[in-house]
Image: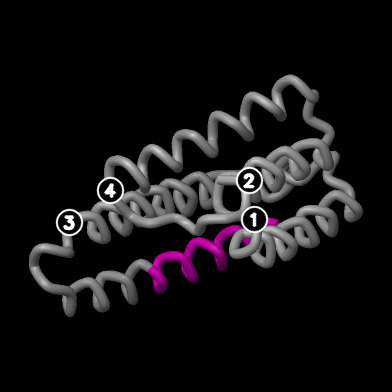
Amino acid sequence: MKKVDMLLGFILLAICGFFYFMISRLPEKAILYPIFVTTVLLILTLIHLITTYLKKEDEESNAFKGLEIKQLLFVIATSGLYVVLINIAGYVTSTVLYVLSTLFGLKVSKKASALISIGFSICIYVLFKILLKVPLPKGFII
């Protein structure tokens, strides 16, 4: 697992380098946010590489413990359905349904799933629609 983690880290470093190269071509007014996001990715990648390097070979990762293949396939299927539904049902409806069904599929409690899906949808709606004034897909309900 250590070799795979190191490889992932180096791939992410290459992606950061590519992003910095592409960001240099952007207009000056549009550079701030991409630089911030890429720098955060670079810092997290370096932390990942350092912790992976310092980790002993026999330490087992708990990242995917308990994840079943059925759950993974369910998330992939619901993600595909979300991509189709977002243009039909609109952002709010399809996002609430997507997050809710995905969390149910991952065996999160019903109360937590409902709160997370509604809260997430509202936060993203406020961020993009109200603060950034970016149009979101409209649907038959909202």
Question: Sequence-wise, which precedes: disc 1 or disc 4?
Answer: 1
**Which structural element holds mark 3?**
helix
Which of discs 4 and 2 lies nearer the camera? The answer is: 2
Q: Is disc 2 in contact with disc 1, using a CB cutoff of under 8 Å? A: yes
Say which amino acid is labelled 3: Leu
Marks 3 and 2 sit apart, C-alpha to C-alpha, by: 32 Å
User: Where does label 2 land, which residue?
Assistant: 93
Provide the residue span drawn in magenta: 1-15
Residue 59 visible in the displayed image: no
User: Where does label 3 land, which residue?
Assistant: 32
Q: Is residue 127 left or right of residue 6?
A: left
**Which structural element holds mark 2?**
helix
| 47 falls in the magenta region | no
Residue 87 visible in the displayed image: yes
The x, y position of residue 10, in whole percent, is 47, 67
Marks 4 and 2 sit apart, C-alpha to C-alpha, by: 20 Å
